[in-house]
Amino acid sequence: GENVEQHPSTLSVQEGDSAVIKCTYSDSASNYFPWYKQELGKGPQLIIDIRSNVGEKKDQRIAVTLNKTAKHFSLHITETQPEDSAVYFCAASNTGNQFYFGTGTSLTVIP
Amino acid sequence: GAVVSQHPSRVICKSGTSVKIECRSLDFQATTMFWYRQFPKQSLMLMATSNEGSKATYEQGVEKDKFLINHASLTLSTLTVTSAHPEDSSFYICSATRGLGTDTQYFGPGTRLTVL
C-alpha cells in the first residue's frame, strides 16, 4: 500500500518568512495530492491540491509543487502570517478515494 | 461550496452507553463518506468508508459491531459508538466526496467524544 512521509514534524518561522513542508510517497499510481490545514479542535480544511498531470499550482500565498519522478511534493507558504499557524497534513490518493495522510507538520508563525 | 457538518461537536457519556454522531453534506450530494479517528497530535486514521445504500467497508482492526455506520441518504451518514468505553474517547471526523470519480474529500468540523 501507499506510504506517505511528511517533514518536518514541527516548523517555526518568523512572520513574513516562507515555510516549506515536504512529503514523499511510495505508490507511483498515486495521482492526487491535497494539502489540509487543521486548527486546534477543528476538522481539516482543504487549502490546495494538485494532480499528477501538473507540476506546480499556486493560489495567492500558497503553492504546491510535485515531482512525480522523485515521488515527492511540497507545500510553500510565502509571507507567513500568525493565522497560518496550524497543523498541516499532506495526503496522496490514487482516485480509489482512499487518502493516505502524512503525519502532520505543526507550523508556528512567530509575530 | 462544499460544506460538511457534524453533530454533536462535543459529547460526554458514561461507560457502557451508545453515542450517535451525524455527518451531513449541506450543499452537495455525497456518494461516499469517510469516518476518521484522530488521537491528540496524531494524523487521521481511517476507520471506514461508506457508500450510500450499501454496507460500510471497515479498515483492518476496526470493530464493525462496535462502530456502526449507516449511510441512508446522499447527504447523511451516522456513526454509532456502541457500549462506549474510556478508550473510545477521541476526536471523530467525517469527510465526504461529491461523487464517483471525484476524489477531493471535504471534512466536517469533528466530534470530541469523552467517555467517563
Image: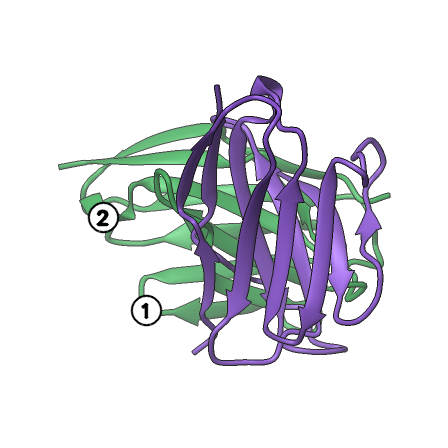
Q: Is residue B49 above or below residue A25?
A: below
Observer able to see residue A87: yes
The chain shown in purple is which?
A: B
The chain shown in green is which?
A: A
Q: Is residue B44 above or below residue B116?
A: below
Q: Amino acid at mark 2?
A: Glu
* Label 1 chain ID: A
Mark 1 and mark 2 lie on one chain; the one further toward the N terminus is: 1
Residue B110, how many percent across, how many down? 46, 47
For the residue pair A61 and B31, the one nearer the viewer reads as B31
What is the quadrant of residue B55 in the picture? bottom right
Q: Are marks 1 and 2 in contact (CB under 8 Å)?
A: no
Q: Is residue B64 left or right of residue B108?
A: right
> Residue shown at 59%/30% (left/top)?
B17
Nearer the camera: disc 1 or disc 2 = 2
Q: 10 Å neighbourhood of mark 2: few (<14), some, or many (≥20)?
A: few
Task: Report the disc number at residue A60.
Answer: 1
For the residue pair B3 and B53, the one nearer the viewer reads as B53
Observer able to see residue A55: no
Residue B105, how many percent across, how many down? 60, 63
Q: Amino acid at mark 1?
A: Gln
Q: Is residue B89 above or below residue B44?
A: above
